[in-house]
Image (cartoon, helix red, strand yellow):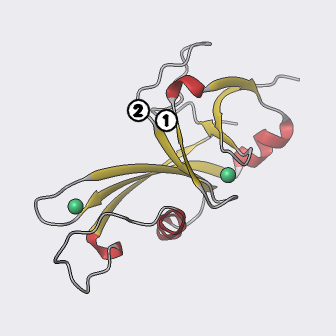
Amino acid sequence: MYLQQVFLLRCPCGKPIVLPRQSPLGRDEGQQYRPTDKWPLVFACIDCERSSAHLARKVQLEDTDEKLAQYLRTRSLWRLEIQCAHESCGERWTIYTIEAKDAPEIDVVRAVRRIVPPTHIHPGAQGQLPFPAERYNVSRFDYDF
Ligand SMILES: [Zn+2]
Ligand SMILES: [Zn+2]
């Protein structure tokens, strides 16, 4: 049986954070890992409801098994690019998560923001919740199994 190898990181809870080959994170360059996205990678884990930061040099090449492949077929790596919508600020954050392929974008954003609450609040923005003061650019990367 042919087992594909994948680049992955691990959440402190043990959940594999597989980097899809088609994403800027998991480009296939043979056995060598060449990160092309911004690092460290911040990952919000839906399983343990914690976030963790990962360095590119921690990426490992591992064999998949049928169980992992099956799990990944129903999942995608989601990237949330968050931008502060406050006038003349424009600060940005990028957070990744693994969620169901067919999850509605808004649910993914909510789940991530529950795990990593916004901490960036401008003084004077009274009575304004941080949630609507952000803009989201959501990308989804599928696994090729
Ligand atoms: Zn976890
Ligand atoms: Zn701001």
Percent from the top left, x then y, of residue 33?
Answer: 54, 19
Q: Image point 35% across, 51% down: which residue?
A: 93
Q: Secondary structure at mark 1?
A: loop
Residue type (three-letter) at the residue carrying disc 1: Ser
Spatial CA span between label 1 and label 2: 9 Å
The quarter of the picture where the C terminus appears is top right
Q: Image point 80% across, 25% down: which residue?
A: 3
- In front: 116, or 5? 116
Percent from the top left, x then y, of residue 63?
Answer: 77, 25
Q: Is residue 106 left or right of residue 49?
A: left
Residue at the outermost left position = 88
Residue at the outermost bottom position = 127
**Which badge, 1 or 2, is on the more N-terminal residue?**
1
Percent from the top left, x then y, of residue 99?
Answer: 61, 56
Q: Which residue is mark 1?
A: 23
Residue 118, picture quadrant: bottom left
Q: Is residue 64 left or right of residue 92?
A: right
Q: Secondary structure at mark 2?
A: loop
Q: Image point 62% across, 13% down: which residue?
A: 31
Q: Is residue 49 left or right of residue 65?
A: left
Residue type (three-letter) at the residue carrying disc 2: Asp
Residue 115, compared with residue 81, is above or below; it is below
The quarter of the picture where the N terminus appears is top right
- In front: 51, or 82? 51
- In front: 81, or 67? 81
Residue 70 numbered mark, or none: none
Cβ atoms at labels 1 and 2 below 8 Å apart: yes
Residue 108, compared with residue 63, is above or below; it is below
Question: In the image, is the residue at mark 2 within 8 Å of ligand 1 by its beta carbon?
Answer: no
Residue 37 numbered mark, or none: 2
**What number of labels is visible?**
2
* Mark 2 surroundings within 10 Å by alpha-carbon count, few (fewer than 14), some (14 through 19), many (20 or more): few
